[in-house]
Image (tube, rainbow, N blue to C red):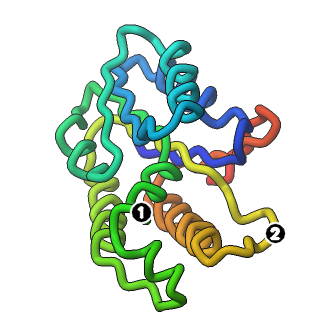
Amino acid sequence: MRELIIGGARSGKSLLAERRASESGLHVVYVATAQALDAEMSRRIEHHQARRCREWGLVVEPLDLAAALRRHAAPEVCLLVDCLTLWLSNLLFAGEAVSQAEAGEPLRCPRLAGATQALIDLLPQLPGRVILVSNEVGWGIVPMAAVARLFADEQGRLNQRVAAVCERVTLVAAGLPLTLK
């Protein structure tokens, strides 16, 4: 089974995902997409690490998420991906997308398109359980900067595509889960 858990920043989505992974009865492999590029992000990563089960496996993959999931998926495994939001951000900055947005050009980024399509194609085929965490960023104002607008648009599109191939989708607000699908 595949589940997408979405919500705003500090909504409780990661805690819910971790609880569901623990309750799955499967061996959990935590797939982290964050990169510790500054002190603040390092503290966030440490916070997540401190509350995780020590028995869980850990895979750090900031870009090639589909390949990491393919390598570690198994019938007796629960893959917990935290999070799609940072993965998307990594992809946007790794390819041409950011420079295209800043230049006011249409988005033509093969790395982004290929990586997201690979994930969408792979998810329905994976054995075991997969729990994906993602931010819902489109409920605020339209950002002023082109890069921020590009990110919000692409995050919304990614969440829609992932939700379409997941059997369960849960929205978390104020620590409370609401089943959407």
Q: How many residues crowd around disc 2 within 10 Å: few (fewer than 14), some, or many (20 or more)?
A: few
Mark 2 and mark 1: span between their CA atoms? 22 Å
Q: Residues within 10 Å of mark 1 (few under 14, many from 20)?
A: few
At 59% from the left and 33% from the top, the residue drawn is: 40
**Residue 6 in the figure: left or right of residue 102:** right
Residue 105 in percent (x, y) is at: 48, 91
The residue pinned by badge 2 equals 141
Q: Nearer the viewer, mark 2 or mark 1?
A: 1
> Which kind of residue does numbered mark 1 sit on?
Phe
Task: Assign a secondary structure to mark 1.
Answer: helix
Residue drawn 67% across the image and 74% down it: 145
Do callouts 2 and 1 mark residues in contact (Cβ within 8 Å)? no
Asked whether residue 51 appears in the rendered view, the answer is yes
Q: Where, quadrant-wise, is the N terminus in this rendering?
A: top left
Dividing the picture into quadrants, the one containing residue 27 is top left
Q: Does residue 141 sit above or below 3 in this rendering?
A: below
Q: Amino acid at mark 2?
A: Ile
Sequence-wise, the earlier of marks 2 and 1 is 1
How many numbered circles does the render carry? 2
**Quadrant of the rendered image containing residue 110:** bottom left
Instruction: Between residue 140 and residue 160, name the one nearer to us.
Output: 140
The residue shown at (21%, 45%) is 70
Query: Which residue sits furthest bottom?
Result: 105
Dot 2: element: loop
Camera sees residue 131? no
Q: For mark 1, what is the residue?
A: 93
Q: In the image, 103: left or right of 11? A: left
